[in-house]
Image (cartoon, grey):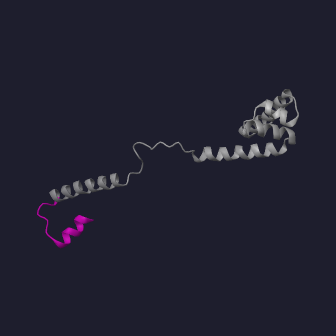
Amino acid sequence: MKALKMECTTHIDNPLAYGYRMAHHLIVDHHREKNKYPESLEYEPESNDLSLENLLEYEQRLRIYQQVLTQMPALRRDVFIRRRLHGESRQQISKSLGLSEEAVKKHISRAMDMLKEAISGFITS
């Protein structure tokens, strides 16, 4: 298009040489423009942030955990939260709730089983 427009306004002595020179400049311009706004990066930046898929999976698991916790018997939920979320020892929990350490251990174990079962159902579906 440039060559056709140029021919209308000025006389070109050597059209073939002019065409080659113009093609060369167009290729150089194209590469400059391409390098200015690359379509993809040669080295993708690394990020420790969660990907969108991982974030979605995390939120789904969190909802499942919340649902399972609300379905647990109140005492089991209380024991589990004290142990897993607040970091209380089994001995502390047993003293404060008037339970044996073995009962506390069973509540924690059964709560974990409920959570594992719910998550395994989530993964297979």
In front of the other: 114 or 87: 87
Is residue 114 found inside the magenta-colored segment of the image?
no
The residue positioned farthest toward the left in the image shown = 13
In front of the other: 8 or 96: 96
- Image: 10 above or below 52: below
For the point 77% across and 40% down, which residue is it?
81
For the point 86% across and 37% down, which residue is it?
97
- Image: 40 above or below 101: below
- Image: 21 above or below 83: below
The residue positioned farthest toward the top in the image shown = 102
* x then y, percent, for residue 85: 73, 40
Assign the C terminus to one quadrant of the image. Answer: top right
In front of the other: 85 or 46: 85
The residue positioned farthest toward the bottom in the image shown = 9
* x then y, percent, for residue 71: 84, 44
Quadrant in the rendering for residue 12: bottom left
Q: Is residue 125 visible?
A: no
Q: Which residues are magenta?
A: 1-15
Assign the N terminus to one quadrant of the image. Answer: bottom left
| Left or right: 51, with 32 as reference point | right
